Image (cartoon, grey):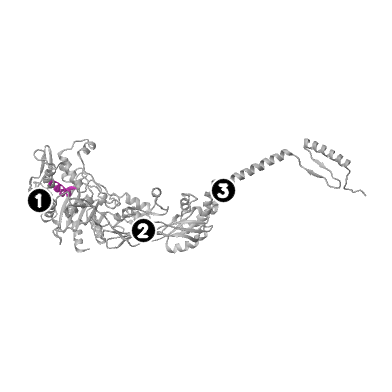
Amino acid sequence: MRDPFLIESSSRDDVKRRSLSHFSQSREQGTEATWLFPGHDTIHVGTDLRRLRWAFVIMCCIFAVFIIRVSGIQIVHGDEYRSSAEENRIRIIDIPPPRGIVMDRSREQLATNTPDFLLSVVPADLPKDQGEKTKVLEKVSSLLNIKYEEVEKKVSSVSRYSYEPLVIADQIPHDLSVVLEIEVKKLPGIEMSVSSLRHYSDDTSYSHILGYTGKLTQSEYDAEKKAGKVYQFNDVIGKTGIESMYEDTLRGIMGKKEIEVDALGNEQKVIAESPPVPGSNLVLTVRAGLQQMVTERLAQALKDDHTSTGATAVVLDPRTGEVLAMVSSPTFSSNSFAQGISPEEYRKLSTDPKLPLFNRAISGEYPSGSVIKPVIAAAGLQEHVITPQTTYLSTGGVRIGDWFFPDWKAGGHGVTDVYKALAQSVNTFFYYTGGGDNQTFTGLGVDRIRKYAELFGLNALLGIDLPGERPGFLPTKEWKERVKKEPWYIGDTYHLSIGQGDLLVTPLQVATYTSAIANGGTLYRPFIVKDIISHDGSTETRSNPAVIRSGFISPENIHIVKQGMREGVLTGSSRGLLSLPITSAAKTGTAQFDGDRTHGWFTSFAPYENPEIVVTVLIEGGGQGNDVALPVARDILSWWHDHPA
């Protein structure tokens, strides 16, 4: 029996030839080829090779793009994406250190820290979907009861990829913070934290000394970052005063914490932590009770004198240069700035014509009036222009050509030596000592006046550890010719000799050179921070007196000037101090400015035999020094005597 699946060879060859012929024809015509097998169904195969070629090319392109994309992700941006992915799991958090506190010399706390509850947004943890993100921010605005637009504006101000917390609200009441702590755990990108807020126990008496802290501005943040210092957007920084001058000391060192977070950015566990180093504490030279008393007394002086625009007092220890009190009035509230001053309140302060933000003690530059005369007397004695026996006849002033330079007393003071000249502030004596008579007697002249004024600390920064100190100004012949296009006249020297004309000094400078006279001829650098106490309790003492210079006036000549100032209390223009229970020496001053208006000056020291305190007072635009400034100084000296340290 024949196998039905066997085909004879001749038959197979015939089928093969017909099939190949049919396939060739079909390939050329683009039709289907039919293969016939005995006992099998017919099978159809697509043979459009052009379509196959295009399909192959497209598949190759897709594969190439895929390879390039994967290579880009893994090779070019690999580190970036790897870091971003790691951030989703591991975070390094900066831990701000507690700011150092500030105390007065008796360790009474003046600037401390209080808890501050914050709600912040971590932009990179917010939902990527805009709708979901909006819902989160709307919930935040609802919880805080603030406008959504305000929240959205803040969030939009920083990069959406930032992991640095952006504070949306601070100074949140404790009760509300407890509620928020629970609610924000449900909101991705939202967190609660506790920071510290600066608090000043007596924020008006010390406002110009302590200054205040405030939020970093963008320019401050950029500057600190450029300087290599680590700050966060939300950090505070010292803006003025001691807070600014000792920012690096008070701030401490930032800590670090490495944590693991979940998908919502919530902390799961701490992996590693280096605690922050607290800022150092400062002990000031200032006496709290004296500072408060001076503040109140100056405020009263301004209240009594409606013509005055401001006042200041500087109290120094002449043996060291320590600042015992320093007040500029009117003043302001440091707490208002530290807690976030409103634009309206700031505008009111900054536009106040009495300049409450201005520290008159170190930044105010004024004509000195007659408080410069002890310096002129010391220079004249040291240069042998005058001696204790030198006398001039005061008949009411000095006439040079068509110009007349008056004494303050009509008819003059009669025969005057250096003691009487200082005691009664006789202009004629200092006209001659400073400028001569333009014929037979030369006098010191402008160059030597300038030389000794600079030796006493004028025309330069004294270097007190507070920002904003000004150097004052001493004119020269060259300056006048260059700026005013006029030659220097003898009248200019006369004006300089009595503290008028273009001379400018600061109250701190007057107090400092008064201290040099009081202590026998040593010019100390004034300072206000006594000790720095680090977090481990170790103390760096800064109270070692820093001598700027000494020996530039002989002790004998200094003693003559002191005697003249003492005579001022006994018989002269400073007799108002005679009622004090301690001996003292002083010099009054009345400095003309703006037409006939005058500043009232008074500088003094006590006890006369062994000086321990210098008090310098300026009543801005207040009139005669012995009328307005002397009573303030007298009350300060009286308080100091009644309240020994």
The amino acid at mark 2 is Gly
What is the total number of numbered labels drawn onto the structure image?
3
Q: Residues within 10 Å of mark 2 (few under 14, many from 20)?
A: many
For label 2, the residue is 279
Residue 24 image-quadrant placement: top right
Nearer-the-camera pick, 638 or 77 = 77
Residue 75 visible from this viewpoint: yes
Closer to the camera: disc 1 or disc 3?
3
- In the rendering, which numbered label is found on residue 74? 3
Chief SS of the magenta region: helix
Question: Residue 168 appears at what percent x and percent y?
Answer: 45, 55
Question: Residue 307 appears at what percent x and percent y?
Answer: 22, 51
Q: Residues within 10 Å of mark 1 (few under 14, many from 20)?
A: many
For label 1, the residue is 420
Q: Counting residues from the N terminus, which is met first, the one under dot 1 or under dot 2?
A: 2
Kindly state the secondary structure of the residue where label 2 is placed: loop
